[in-house]
Amino acid sequence: MASHGKVQKRDFFDWLHGYTGQKYTTTLLFLLIPIILMILFTIIPAANMFIFSFQERDQFGVNPEWVGLDNYKTIFTDSSYLSTFRNSLYYLAGSFAQQAIALFIAVILCSRIKFANVFKGVIFFPYMMNGVAVSLIFRRFFQKGDGITNTEGTLNSIIQMFGGDPVKWLSNPDIVNWCLVFASIWRYIGFDIIMYIGAIQSISPDIYEAADLDGANAWQRFRYIIFPSIRPIVALQLILAIKGAVSVFEIPYIITGGKVGTSTFVIKTIDTAFTYQHVGLASAMAVVLLAIILVVTGIQKAFFREDK
Amino acid sequence: MKIQRILSAALTSAIILSIAGCGGNTANTTTTAASSGGNDTAAATTAAAGTTTAASADSTNSGEKLTLTVLTHRTDRLANGGDGSLEEMTKAFETANNCTVKYQGFTDYAGDVSTMMSTSEYGDVLMIPDTVKLSDLSNYFEPLGSYDDLKEKYNWADQKMYDGVVYGISHRGSVSGGICYNKKVWADAGITTLPVTTDEFIADLKLIRDNTDAIPYYTNFAAADWTLSQWSSLVMSASGKSSYNNDILINAEDLFVPGGAYYEVFKLMYSVFADSTLIEEDPMTSDWEGCKAAINSGKIGTMVMGSWAVSQFAEAGDHPENIGYMPAPFSVNGQQYAQSASDYAMGVNKNRSSEIKELGKKYITWFVEESGFAKKEGAIPTLKGSDMPDYLEAFSNCIFFTEDTAPDGLVGVWNEIDNDSQVGIWAGDAANFKIQIAEAALAGNDFSAIEKIYADCNSRWNATRDANATYTAYKAG
């Protein structure tokens, strides 16, 4: 028995020092830190949130009460919760425009123009900026001055330079959401353009050559070569746009604070948790949002599998 | 295959770019913190320094100087980022008790300290955040005495009281219902007596519009999450009844009824906001920091603000003598009333050694009785019988009163209903009734829109009240 154990032990150490053993230990050790971090900062808080969503609790978590599905009932029966998704439609509409513009710019940047890399850098830059900074820039951009406590913002200054009258961009409920959508497009379009450029550049140059020989013009090249080749990426981008539209947060929160009808579901969640201290209800709202995003992701996955 | 390749290329580029993005962000935040947020970084350094000294003081023998850590929201009075008058003032206490007092300032006091309170590390003496429910006070704070003993000596002794035990003593108080105005602007407009009714108030604003260049009323709507709640502070004064809220609760009345204080105060707010000639050009991009200097220099006539704002407006420019404070323009049978209320109450962290807790109690007593902080800040001192500050002269005809405590069995119920129904009399969330009223007024809707908002609040309030377990138990028993 003893000798048998010894042999096994030596076998294990041999294995450990061999190629496969070292491969596994290295992999495990490298994975250990990210996995611990993920469990600590993602899995445990998310699990807690899921538990909280069945409780009634304040932000200190003193004496939480189990209420079952009551929080979810509130969300789906009280119209003031789900109605905040209405504003997501603005961002969804904006994201269609965003995709069209991004595709247009990507096609231009992929043709032989001078300084293409400089343009790529400039256009991608906003995406690397902090969302809070972008929001502050646009608050200043859309500002309507009164000449007493503040001056005209960038946009109104330009309008005045051409003799126009300044506009109250952020006070008018009819246009404020479009202003916010504009800020959102400005920030995220760089990422879309890079995705499209990546896709367009992977098209084989032989096809272009053949098209040139056949005398295809620029539009025909786009319509019959580029667009069919990058269709999966277009679909992916549209699905990402839906995800983005349901979870809009920082731009309206910082520019308008959700006032003048610009509130979104995430802002409502924050108010529920930290203004009214219904952490349980707010957790349930977060779970609902998570579920929506999971469903959209599922659709996206199914879509791509079919395409293969 | 091709799709896979495209995808992997896209993903790789996304990963690389997001790493680059992270790098950019970090650099961004550090530089902003260093350049603009001098206040915060300084506060953070003090915080760190405070904790280390506290720890070392604990570890050495008890004959050494004790260190008391005090959390405060008054960053403008600390040496780091403020004028340092708080530390200066505290030297007397330090010498008298052979101890060191470390202040930690927080610019977002309620938010930061509420989060800290989920651990046991929330200073030794602190301003009690209002997010702590009265019934939970004993879990966090040391009892400071019985209500019956303290109420003779101090104003607002009931503010942080539960079951007859006081856990926090207000550090100062203020006239809660009032309006800041520029005396010169009002005089230049030809106004000789201050308004005592809402109609007179609106008429006076129109005089300012016609006779001066100043903006008659500045809404501060961009910061509506807290500036509109200043209007809520006019309600008790407008009612003239110390039991106004209690009566509504006990008699199961609607919150908003025509003629009632809630209804009339927000009707006045609607009337001001709905007349675009009386307010600033674009309320959505108003600027709170900028308006302080503007009211000081006479470019703004009027703002509804708690009296805490008076000293800030006075310090913001060259004409501190022009900043005045007037009572809420409401009268009951010809008599104006003014509610006085407590600012943050100070409590002692119960998770500390008895030595520190004793010192903390001494500190609180010294602060409210001897420090002179309240008078210097233009606030009403906590100790009864102290001198009142000068700027309250416009209140000479008013009757001061303090809101009654809730009856036994209903303590904290008002706030519970307010939170659970999400009416949020003092809250500033995007769906709040005050913001809805202001938006309706700014959009030019007529008053029927406001009555709809009132009715919605009433029905939510009443439904929540009737479902509240403590309330139904009180009514039954």
Image (tube, rainbow, N blue to C red):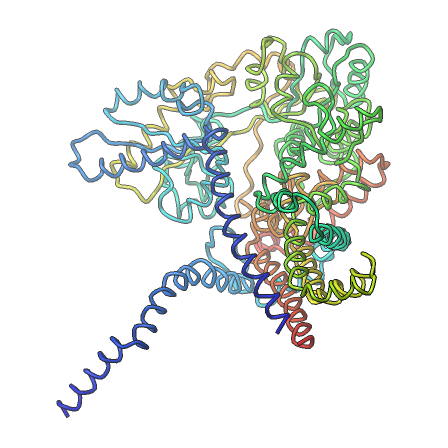
Judge by depth and name the residue closer to the eye, B2 or B78.
Answer: B2
| Residue B396 drawn at (x, y percent) | 62, 13
Q: In this view, does B183 lie above or below A166?
A: above
Instruction: Report the number of numbered marks.
Output: 0
Q: In this view, does B73 lie above or below B204?
A: below
Judge by depth and name the residue closer to the eye, A44 or B392.
Answer: A44
Describe residue B295's horizontal placement relative to residue A20 as left or right: right
Instruction: Say which quadrant the C terminus of chain A sits in.
Output: bottom right
| Residue B183 drawn at (x, y percent) | 67, 10
Q: In this view, does B1 lie above or below A237?
A: below
Q: In which quarter of the image is residue A234?
A: bottom right
Q: In this view, does A288 lie above or below B422?
A: below
Describe residue B474's horizontal placement relative to residue A235 as left or right: left
Q: In which quarter of the image is residue A158?
A: top right
Identified at 84% across, 24% down, the residue is A163
Examine the rendering and report whether any part of residue B206 can be seen: yes
Judge by depth and name the residue closer to the eye, A40 or B368.
Answer: A40
Describe residue B451's horizontal placement relative to residue B119 as left or right: right
